[in-house]
């Protein structure tokens, strides 16, 4: 199952954020999107890298402190794939397909 997940991530151009360095690199990249999952929410959300809802301290909590048990962060440059996977556009930063 883990292998299948990795393969799907590769095909869909999704890269999971597992370190803060990786988060910083993705955040600094133009046209990069973040897809955030949360067990308390019905669907993943997609944000622009500059969105106020994408914060390093929250990534630290969710990814490092809580070990991704309550949700995960992914980055992608393929907005359409994130949308096709069920992610909803953040109403604050309003990401759109290029
Ligand atoms: Zn946003």
Image (cartoon, rainbow, N blue to C red):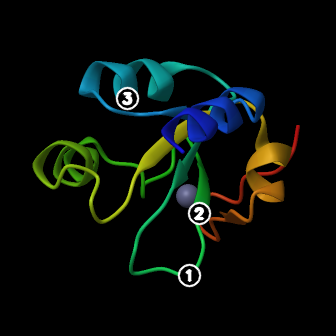
- Could you say where residue 14 lies in the image, as x and y percent from the top left? 63, 34
Which residue is disc 2 drawn over? 45
Q: Is residue 26 above or below residue 73?
A: above
Q: Is residue 33 left or right of residue 22?
A: right
- Could you say where residue 68 lies in the image, as x and y percent from the top left? 28, 52
CA separation, marks 3 and 2?
Answer: 16 Å
Quarter where residue 24 is shown: top left
- Could you say where residue 20 lies in the image, as x and y percent from the top left? 26, 27
Q: Is residue 53 left or right of residue 88?
A: left
Quarter where residue 56 is shown: top left
Which residue is disc 1 drawn over? 42
Q: Residue furthest front?
A: 1
Secondary element type, mark 2:
strand
Which residue is disc 3 drawn over? 23
CA separation, marks 3 and 1?
Answer: 24 Å
- Could you say where residue 84 lies in the image, as x and y percent from the top left? 84, 56
Ligand 1 is located in which of the four quadrants? bottom right
Q: Is residue 63 above or below residue 15?
A: below
Quarter where residue 98 is shown: top right
């Amino acid at each position: 199952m883990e292998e299948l997940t990795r393969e799907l991530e590769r095909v869909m151009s999704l890269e999971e954020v597992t370190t803060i360095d990786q988060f910083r690199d993705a955040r600094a990249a133009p046209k990069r999107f973040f897809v955030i999952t949360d067990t308390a929410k019905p669907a993943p959300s997609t944000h622009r890298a500059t969105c106020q809802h994408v914060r390093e301290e929250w990534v630290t909590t969710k990814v490092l402190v809580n070990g991704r048990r309550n949700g995960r962060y992914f980055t992608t440059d393929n907005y359409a794939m994130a949308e096709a996977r069920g992610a909803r556009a953040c109403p604050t930063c309003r990401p759109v397909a290029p």
